[in-house]
Amino acid sequence: MLSGGSERARSTGTPPYTSYRTFKTFIQDLDEHGVPSRIDRSVLTRFSGVVGTQLMHALRFLGLIEGHGRPTQRLKELVSAHSAGHWPEKLLELLRQEYAPMFAIELETATPSHFNGAFRKAFPAADAVVQKCVTFFLYAANDAGVKISGRVLKGRKPRSLTPRRKPAKPAYAHPQEIEAGTSEPQPAMLGIEAKKPSEVLLMYLDPNEMDDEQQAAVWTMLKYFKSRGL
């Protein structure tokens, strides 16, 4: 059983709002390199300042670190479970403790309004933050094998719960399809109009598959494209 977490009730605080992929990447790093005596910026060098701050918040809420970043026994057990292949079971145990109000409802049959109402009541926060908190919870719950109502997941299913889409067809022809004698690529004969680079970029991206740093890089690139009218 997970132990070592703070005895205080964290249900009144804001849950993790970093991406679940960032959290899982951090756990994998600890699995590979060992749990240090202290979790601080020197351990989070692969994450940007904002992402590192969000990750530290997540670790505190989940009872994985104490004051001054000292790892709890709970964190050590979770990392051990990852390396031993018992990740879903330990993660589920953790989620049931820290998101107890959500497990008090029938997640498998809950309606969107019931689910959202319960989440906002248990973890009140600004709308934009709540949406990120919900996304983290849904990804974590999926990873732990929790069955969530399809109505709740509709439109925001974690990738692993959604059949993989076929890649979108390119907006431009393959070099071999360029008409002989022309110096500029011609739009592919796909029945669609040529798109701007920014539109093509968005066609291939799924924010739910990126961590916070990757999303920030993409939005920066999009802003550049738009500033150039591309």
Image (cartoon, helix red, strand yellow):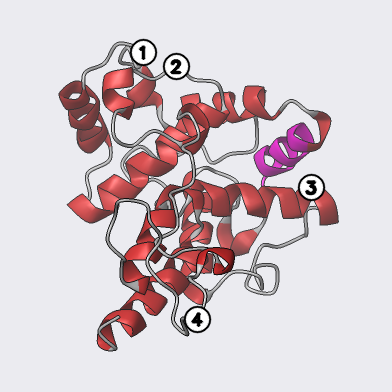
Q: Which residue is mark 1?
A: 108
Q: Is residue 108 left or right of residue 34?
A: left
Is residue 74 magenta-colored?
Answer: yes
Kindly report the distance in space between the C-alpha atoms of the residues bearing marks 1 and 4.
60 Å
Residue type (three-letter) at the residue carrying disc 1: Glu
Asked if one can make out residue 96 in the rendered structure from this viewpoint, the answer is yes
What residue is shown at x 44% (from left), y 55% (from top)? 204
Residue 31 image label: 3
x then y, percent, for residue 144: 56, 26
Kindly report the distance in space between the C-alpha atoms of the residues bearing marks 4 and 3.
57 Å
In the rendered image, which quarter contains the N terminus?
top right
Sooner in the amino-acid sequence: mark 3 or mark 1: 3
Q: Which residue is mark 2?
A: 147
Q: Nearer the viewer, mark 2 or mark 3?
A: 2
**Mark 1 and mark 2 in contact (Cβ < 8 Å)?**
yes
Q: Secondary structure at mark 3?
A: helix
Magenta stretch, residue numbers: 71-82
Residue type (three-letter) at the residue carrying disc 4: Gly
